[in-house]
Image (cartoon, helix red, strand yellow):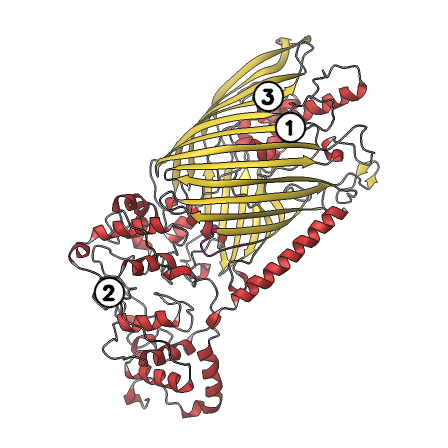
């Protein structure tokens, strides 16, 4: 190898090492979640959508699953589980607004960007903001609700409380009290006694979220996203809103507990593991009260 | 620059001119006419020809066959490109248009999908999450009718009488023909472990490995770290493997495959290479980089230049162009080397023992710009070959007297107008200009190329299982070649054209 080549190779190797170091450091993000799934999901999209411009984009990207008429009956629907959203009903899982209300534009944009885990909905991040806004404008033409109703007011999310053992234990008690285990299972595996019989609003079978294998949620990745899901529910699914039952900081307790169930390194899981090592025998198992559990 | 005739009585000039003749033939498909399979003589000779292994090999085989008076089917040259993979559309239920502006060209989402190791990141990318019946295989072929025409082709002055002397004629041939076939398998082996295996054949069914690699995706949970090992396309911003042209003259970028008159460098920027590539991208793939170390064999497994390495780096940045679309600009550099000394056995070079390597490089900038339905793909590049390589100095010999580096500039402007998602108009203008010949006495314009290509593709249907394109294309190429007859000037312009109608299908 010539001297010039050796120098270039050395510089390249050095650059690669720096790059690996930088990206390796970046990969150690909050909660141990990989970069993927995080990011600019919620960057405000201020573009004004144009339905006429959105139609060909919808045809290009969306119609194969959601159908040319927006009814969720695209040519691929028969092969897809879970089924694509039916836009003619204007019922959306991922919202910042109360259950039963229309989502904000940004809610739907966020869903486009992050995709929906465990479904065939990809992350459409590369589309320009304008394209996203145009598609959204076209989606709104499928249901008259968009002409007669306004989006709900986004639910307020209080500042997150500190992660403590007490908070996790309180969350665990809520998991029992609100019977989350009936669907999500006593260990959060999505295998509760009701899981097999759940259906969505179109009578299609639906599976509860398995916390033990998932790193992302249907509607986000952060603790705030998880909090929001309790409060808004996932419309069109059996996951109801708990806004009437869970008040203020209680929601954070449940968030902190659920984080301990996930297969990722989180502050909650680390704290919980330490506590369990000395106190596991003090815990009553989660499950039906009549079976001697909590 | 001087315009010395190659008939000069200076022995060295004669050598240079002969080298130039050969190299120009290598350099541009326009340099000679293509005789079709239907020609009896061609059929016989072609059947014995070794199967080309990739685009460049096919190109060289094609040109060499012309040089030897044994024209191969030009269809051989137009077989090794397209990467449209309905297997992915079938897996994820997405229409072709989700990943392609029109297939096979990737759009921004398709680029992200590819960058992410053919995953949409929905936790169902691993094969274990798919139905057992799903097998990620796709195939592509292109039955066609084409017309090839070339000016100033050397022929016997009296047909059938090789003693009658030579004359220059315009030759035209036409007929129905076949392309080769691409058999693709690509997808994920596990979450964040992807693969590609591409078997390509020429139009006689002789297969070769066009691509074969395994890629570790999102290492450390970061999209900025991906490692690919095997044979793969260089991370060119303007991909020749996914472009929309198919004809013999228009089916390759002149800049990517240009070889300076007389040069021995066997490299094509559009050729798949063997090596390892580290790459990364932002979550939306707007920012992308790659750095590759490659065996200096131009993608030929076990080539003579084993034990030698090239390097390639690419960087590009895209921008949200609002109503215009996604705009991208990037730069690239390829630094290669080729041995000029070998250990020998019985006078024969021993592959892999090359030393005293000399450098060549290709570097440039490119872009991909949208103005709503109008897309522009400009590229500019500069090429340079070390004097040893540029002069094709024989192995284990001192540098030829008077030899110097050869350099040139090349580029193109390609445009697509998408009337709708199923109909596109295509156009491309290319130029390559020598800025320095390997020998000062060679005409400065020798080897220059101008190319013009226009076409259209119509996709009668668009869904997620298969694709068909009705393809029409016309390409015209001018190459500045050495004079062939005593009556010629030192250089002559040879025009070559292709007219192609094809049914391009992918399942």
Mark 1 chain:
B
Question: Residues in magenta?
Answer: B280-286
Quick one: B18 or A149, which is closer to the camera? A149
Count of numbered circles in the view? 3
Any part of residue B52 in sight: no
Mark 2 chain:
A
Query: Residue at left 26%, top 52%?
Result: A139
**Placement of the N terminus of chain B among the 4 image quadrants:** top right
Q: Does the magenta stretch include residue B139?
A: no
Tag 3 and tag 2 share a subunit = no
**Placement of the C terminus of chain B among the 4 image quadrants:** top left
Query: Residue at left 75%, top 45%?
Result: B352
Check disc 3 and report the residue beneath it. Answer: B32
Label 1 crowd (10 A; few <14 / some 14-19 / many >=20): many
For discs 3 and 1, the disc positioned in front in the rendered view:
1
Q: From the viewer's perspective, is B371 left or right of A288?
A: right
Check disc 2 and report the residue beneath it. Answer: A236
Check disc 1 and report the residue beneath it. Answer: B434
Any part of residue A167 in sight: yes
Q: From the viewer's perspective, is B404 left or right of B361?
A: right
Describe the element under mark 1 as helix, strand or loop. Answer: strand
For discs 1 and 2, the disc positioned in front in the rendered view:
1
Above or below residue A198? Residue B273 is above
Which label's residue is closer to the chain start, 3 or 1?
3
Describe the element under mark 2 as helix, strand or loop. Answer: loop
Label 2 crowd (10 A; few <14 / some 14-19 / many >=20): many
Q: From the viewer's perspective, is B346 left or right of A6?
A: right
Q: In which quarter of the image is residue A254?
A: bottom left
User: CA separation, marks 1 and 2?
Assistant: 66 Å
User: CA separation, marks 3 and 2?
Assistant: 67 Å
Residue B213 percent location from the top left of the image:
57, 51
Residue B189 percent location from the top left of the image:
51, 58
């Amino acid at each position: 190898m010539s001297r010039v080549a050796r120098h270039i190779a050395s510089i390249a190797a050095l650059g690669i090492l720096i790059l690996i170091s930088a990206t390796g450091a970046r990969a150690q993000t909050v909660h141990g979640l990989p970069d993927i799934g995080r990011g600019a999901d919620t960057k405000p999209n201020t573009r004004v959508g144009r339905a006429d411009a959105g139609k060909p984009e919808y045809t290009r990207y969306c119609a194969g699953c959601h159908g040319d008429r927006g009814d969720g009956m695209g040519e691929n629907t028969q092969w897809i589980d879970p089924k694509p959203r039916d836009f003619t009903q204007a019922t959306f899982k991922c919202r910042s607004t109360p259950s039963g209300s229309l989502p904000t534009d940004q809610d739907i944009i966020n869903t486009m960007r992050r995709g929906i885990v465990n479904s065939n909905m990809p992350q459409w991040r590369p589309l320009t903001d304008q394209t996203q806004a145009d598609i959204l404008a076209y989606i709104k033409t499928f249901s008259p609700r968009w002409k007669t109703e306004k989006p709900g007011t986004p639910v307020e999310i209080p500042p997150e409380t500190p992660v403590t053992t007490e908070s996790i234990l309180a969350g665990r008690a809520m998991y029992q009290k609100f019977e989350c285990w009936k669907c999500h299972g006593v260990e959060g595996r999505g295998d509760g006694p009701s899981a097999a019989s759940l259906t969505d609003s179109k009578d299609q079978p639906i599976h509860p979220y398995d916390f033990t294998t998932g790193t992302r949620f249907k509607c986000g990745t952060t603790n705030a996203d998880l909090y929001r899901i309790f409060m808004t529910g996932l419309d069109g699914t059996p996951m109801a809103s708990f806004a009437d039952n869970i008040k203020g900081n209680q929601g954070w307790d449940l968030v902190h507990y659920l984080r301990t169930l996930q297969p990722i390194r989180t502050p909650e899981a680390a704290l919980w593991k330490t506590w369990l090592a000395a106190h596991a025998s003090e815990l009553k198992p989660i499950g039906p009260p009549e079976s001697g559990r909590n | 620059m001087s315009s010395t005739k190659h008939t000069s009585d200076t022995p060295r000039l004669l050598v240079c001119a002969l080298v130039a003749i050969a190299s120009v033939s290598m350099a541009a498909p326009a340099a000679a006419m293509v005789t079709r399979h239907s020609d009896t003589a061609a059929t016989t000779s072609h059947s014995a020809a070794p199967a080309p292994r990739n685009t460049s090999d096919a190109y060289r085989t094609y040109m060499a066959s012309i040089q030897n008076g044994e024209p191969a089917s030009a269809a051989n040259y137009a077989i090794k490109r397209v990467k449209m993979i309905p297997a992915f559309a079938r897996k994820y239920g997405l229409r072709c248009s989700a990943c392609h502006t029109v297939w096979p060209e990737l759009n921004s989402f398709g680029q992200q999908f590819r960058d992410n190791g053919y995953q949409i990141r929905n936790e169902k990318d691993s094969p274990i999450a798919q139905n057992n019946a799903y097998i990620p295989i796709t195939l592509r072929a292109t039955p066609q009718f084409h017309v090839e025409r070339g000016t100033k082709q050397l022929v016997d002055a009296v047909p059938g009488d090789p003693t009658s002397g030579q004359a220059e004629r315009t030759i035209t041939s036409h007929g129905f023909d076949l392309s080769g076939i691409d058999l693709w398998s690509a997808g994920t082996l596990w979450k964040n472990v992807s693969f590609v295996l591409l078997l390509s054949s020429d139009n006689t069914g002789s297969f070769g490995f066009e691509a074969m690699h395994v890629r570790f995706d999102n290492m450390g949970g970061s999209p900025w770290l991906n490692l690919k090992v095997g044979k793969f396309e260089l991370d060119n911003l303007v991909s020749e493997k996914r472009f929309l042209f198919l004809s013999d003259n228009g089916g390759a970028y002149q800049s990517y495959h240009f070889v300076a008159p007389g040069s021995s460098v066997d490299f094509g920027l559009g050729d798949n290479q063997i090596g390892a590539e580290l790459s990364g991208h932002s979550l939306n793939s707007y920012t992308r980089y790659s750095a590759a170390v490659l065996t200096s064999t131009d993608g030929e497994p076990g080539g003579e230049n084993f034990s030698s390495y090239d390097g390639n780096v690419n960087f590009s940045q895209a921008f949200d162009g609002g109503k215009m679309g996604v705009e991208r600009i990037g730069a690239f550099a390829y630094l290669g080397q080729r041995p000029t000394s070998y250990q020998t056995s019985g006078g024969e070079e021993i592959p892999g023992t090359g030393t005293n390597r000399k450098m060549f490089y290709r570097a440039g900038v490119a872009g991909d710009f949208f103005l709503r339905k109008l897309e522009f793909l400009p590229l500019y590049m500069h090429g340079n070959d070390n004097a040893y390589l540029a002069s094709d100095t024989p192995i284990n010999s001192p540098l030829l007297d008077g030899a110097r580096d050869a350099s040139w500039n090349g580029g193109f402007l390609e445009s697509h107008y998408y009337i709708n998602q199923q109909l596109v108009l295509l156009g491309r203008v290319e130029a390559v200009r020598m800025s320095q010949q390997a020998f000062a006495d060679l005409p400065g314009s020798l080897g220059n190329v101008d190319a013009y290509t226009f076409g259209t593709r119509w996709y009668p249907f668009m869904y997620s299982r298969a694709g068909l394109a009705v393809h029409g294309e016309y390409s015209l190429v001018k190459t500045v070649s050495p004079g062939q007859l005593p009556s010629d000037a030192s250089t002559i312009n040879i025009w070559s054209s292709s007219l192609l109608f094809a049914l391009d299908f992918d399942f």
